[in-house]
Amino acid sequence: SADVDDAEMGEIQTIMEISDSNELPLLVKFDFEAEKDNELTVFEGESITGIRQVDAEWWLARNKVGNVGLVPHAYVEKDERADDDIF
């Protein structure tokens, strides 16, 4: 069998888990200040992760420091730059 150490296995597992999910890299187009506890404050140009689209108007998203909340769909777009990082 291939000689793969635990760290590599963990990394492979993480990559597989990420690719199995429907998460999507998003780019914030406009500043949005959370008005409720379940919303996420984001800033123009910020890269966030769309966990899932809740409905036509909201994304459940996670920022780089791990905070999770709702962001308006109109304030974000798919981050095309993120595709370059995968390969």
Image (cartoon, rainbow, N blue to C red):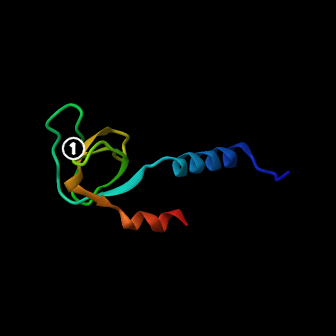
Q: Quadrant of residue 70?
A: top left
Q: Is residue 38 above or below residue 15?
A: above
Left or right of 1? Residue 64 is: left
Secondary structure at numbered mark 1: loop
Q: Is residue 21 above or below residue 81?
A: above
What residue lies at 82% left-to-right and 53% top-to-bottom?
2
What residue lies at 53% left-to-right and 52% top-to-bottom?
19
Q: Position of residue 1 (x, y in %)?
A: 86, 51
For the image shown, how many numbered marks are present on the structure?
1
Q: Is residue 44 above or below residue 4?
A: below
Q: Position of residue 12 (x, y in %)?
A: 64, 50
Q: Position of residue 23 (x, y in %)?
A: 43, 49
Decide which of 21, 48 is in the foreground and name it.
Answer: 21
What residue lies at 63% left-to-right and 45% top-to-bottom?
13
Given the current orientation, which residue lies at the most extreme front position?
56
Q: Which residue is mark 1?
A: 41
Left or right of 57? Residue 86 is: right
Residue type for callout 1: Thr
Left or right of 37? Residue 11 is: right
Q: Residues within 10 Å of mark 1 (few under 14, many from 20)?
A: some
Q: Position of residue 14 (x, y in %)?
A: 58, 46
Q: Quadrant of residue 81?
A: bottom left
Q: Quadrant of the C terminus?
A: bottom right
Given the current orientation, which residue lies at the most extreme right position?
1
What residue lies at 29% left-to-right and 56% top-to-bottom?
46
Given the current orientation, which residue lies at the most extreme top position?
37
